[in-house]
Amino acid sequence: MCKRIRCILLAVLLVCVVTGIAGAAPKYKWSFAQPWSRPLADKGYQLFIDKVKEYTNGDIEITLHSNGLLGTHDESLHGVRDGSVEIGTFSPYVNLVPGGMMNWMPWTVSTFDEARIAYAWPNGVLFKVMQVAWREINAELLFSCSQGSYGLANNVRPLQKPDDLKNLKMRVSSSLASVRTLENMGAGTGMSMETIPWAEIYNALSRGVVDGCWDMWPSMIDERHVEVIKYYTHGLLNWDANNVIINKDLWDSLDPKYQEALYKAGAEAEQYLDDLYEAEEKNYIKKLETEYPNFTITWLTPEEKDVWREKANMPAVWAEICDPWLEKVWPGQKMGEKIRSELDAVREQALAKKK
């Protein structure tokens, strides 16, 4: 009888242990703020969440809140800063992140191959500088979601060289670095600029209020800009990337093994998103080339792009937009020159991989 009782007790104990392991509550339960409706990006964010759970053995459980469920972009960012929200994906606008312009200065990144190098944890040049920028406002950068490069669109003529901007009226926004860059590229051509909200671009183009604007492949299709645009030259301005961040106080409190798991999961999610958006970009291009016969895409050679890049006079734009912040953070180190040199090396490295 005693032996039977011991066996029963052992079996009960084993069941309790197994049940306890399987149903163990996570040590951390976090919210991930996604202020936009972007199903493609959400696939990458969910992969990150799943990988974090895997790499922490279930100790960290994250719930994705898409479509602005935790508030607007700025509200959600303030939530991460004060700790009421743990993680989120954001655009580092300079009114919120003083060094945020470093994330997407024109003529820094132009292709996904370049993005895979420049934004990569832990040594990517843009990862390193944006890590510092985010820490200034109590956040830690985990990874980025690249969505592609901007180009220039218009209804008058193909843009092969800067002189083709002659007398065009171009829509711009309050993104000062992009405005300065376009202003330089169009200097001496009679090009003018008019500030118009992004949501009003379609109507402004359809009514002839402006001749053109900077634009992206997704907007051509998803926002129907192709209906009111005849010509598009790709890769002439800035790269669009959002940053995934975590509250800095929370980050600092974590065991290093959890920090490593978060970075590892972020690196995998970033690679997945790069591949996903690059494939989707190819789909957009194919659709534009096959279904819109009145829409013309101008493809530039690296040498032709260099002509635009030279006229953009990026050292002057950096001196105005970036150097004041860089000098404050890294006094006397000429970081603007060093970062541009690293970005040039990234461009050469990416080109070499394609040959």
Image (cartoon, grey):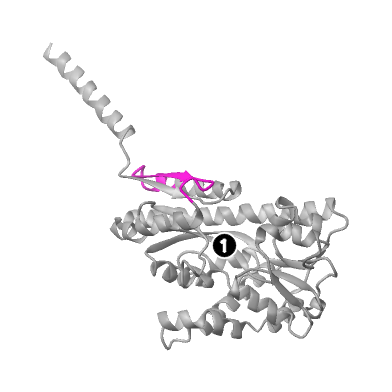
Residue at 39% x, 48% y: name it. 55
Stretch of the chain drawn in magenta: 51-71
Residue lying farthest top? 1
Mark 1, other Cα within 10 Å: few <14 / some 14–19 / many ≥20: some
**Camera-side residue of 161 and 77:** 77
Residue 59 falls inside the magenta stretch = yes
Residue lying farthest left? 2
Residue under label 1, please give it.
241
Can residue 103 be seen in the rendering of this structure? yes
Residue 265, position as x, y percentages in the image: 45, 53
User: Which image quarter: residue 139?
Assistant: bottom left
Residue at 57% x, 62% y: name it. 241
Q: How many marks?
A: 1
64 left or right, relative to 56: right
Name the amino acid, label 1.
Answer: Ala
Q: Which quadrant is home to the N terminus?
A: top left
347 left or right, relative to 140: right
Residue lying farthest right? 293
Residue 100 vertical position relative to residue 72 in the rendered view, above or below: below
Residue at 88% x, 58% y: name it. 294
**Camera-side residue of 68 and 298:** 68
Q: Which quadrant is home to the C terminus?
A: bottom right
Element type where label 1 sits in the image: strand
Can residue 246 be seen in the rendering of this structure? no
Residue 157, position as x, y percentages in the image: 85, 70
Residue 39 vertical position relative to residue 179 in the rendered view, above or below: above
Residue 232 falls inside the magenta stretch = no
120 left or right, relative to 12: right
Residue 121, position as x, y percentages in the image: 47, 64
Residue 61, position as x, y percentages in the image: 38, 43
Residue 237 vertical position relative to residue 26 in the rendered view, above or below: below
